[in-house]
Image (cartoon, rainbow, N blue to C red):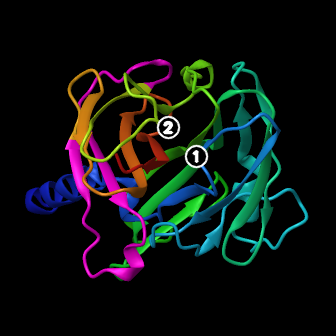
Amino acid sequence: MLSASTLIKKIATFTLALSLPLTAIAHERFILPSHTVLSGEEVQSVSFIASISNAIFHGDKPLGDNGKGIVAPKLAPLFKRLKPIVIGPDGVSREMSWQAFSRFSVADTQLEQSGTYRIALVQPDVPMTTFIKADGKKGRFFGNKGKVPSGATNIVKRTTASRVETYVSFNEPNNAALKATGEGLELGGETHPNDLFVDETIHFQLTFQGKPLQQSTKVKVVKGATRHRNQRDEKIIETDAQGNFSLTLSQAGFYLLSANIDVKGEAGSGIDIHHHSLYATLEVFVQ
């Protein structure tokens, strides 16, 4: 039988494990477009790279593949689950082809209609178990077939889902592609994501399953090229209880906005936490 002190310690460490965001054990993700705003009478093309990397906008591992690329065995199951889509200015969604290389994945899309395009890599729920091994090291496995080693503690059954996206406008921006799909954590709000300028206040809102996020959470915004400076200079903003938040950025360039929420699993579901994350690439322009 466990002593009272040991039992209290186990409860405390289990509670801590439940409160840890997945960013503590996972890399960040991004899609970086060659352009976010284009104009003209002829059809235009935009190229993209996508990567799993903590060096913002510098590739580390690929994200997404069409079956023709270079895929490490440990990433293959993730790529099979990813849904690569582009939502056009008419609000219609279609598939998008990504090819993996050693450090990033690449894709192209054509802009035929005027308006805003939303490019996304969506990862539906993936089962995942995290734990602390008997030697104190962290452990995890994906899926339901893994085995928790003997003596492990802090065992947490999870699902993880993510949305990685960016936005491109051709001629006049519009909002059809920005409408919430109802799948996971998404970015919306008053400000159009292709209408961002230095020193102007940006008003966004997080939605979850198609409705305003009904809890306060933290949003992180990081300017690109973190590899070339000593400090990441992360900007942390807290949303209100409906997911609304505002920010002002003083430098032009590409930024990665990210947010994470944990939703408690229903009783009897066998899941402790449903983890949802959002990674959105934004470009801020000079006045």
Q: Amino acid under label 1?
A: Thr
From the viewer's perspective, is 60 left or right of 64? left
In terms of secondary structure, where does tag 1 sit?
Answer: loop
Counting labels gives 2
Q: Is 11 located above or below residue 139 in the figure? A: above
Query: Which residues lie in the magenta part?
Result: 208-237
What residue lies at 23% left-to-right and 33% top-to-bottom?
239
Q: Give residue 110's quadrant in the image.
A: top right
Near-viewer residue (183 or 251): 251
From the viewer's perspective, is 209 left or right of 89? left
Q: Give residue 219's quadrant in the image.
A: top left
Whether pointer 2 and pointer 1 mark residues with C-beta atoms closer than 8 Å, the reply is yes
Q: Residue furthest left?
A: 5
Kindly identify which numbered label has been placed on residue 194. 2
- Residue at numbered disc 1: 36
From the viewer's perspective, is 183 left or right of 102? left
Q: CA distance from mark 2 to mark 1?
A: 7 Å
What residue lies at 26% left-to-right and 61% top-to-bottom?
234
Q: Position of residue 278 (x, y in %)?
A: 47, 43
Q: Amino acid under label 2?
A: Asn
Kindly identify which numbered label has been placed on residue 253. none
What residue lies at 76% left-to-right and 63% top-to-bottom?
76
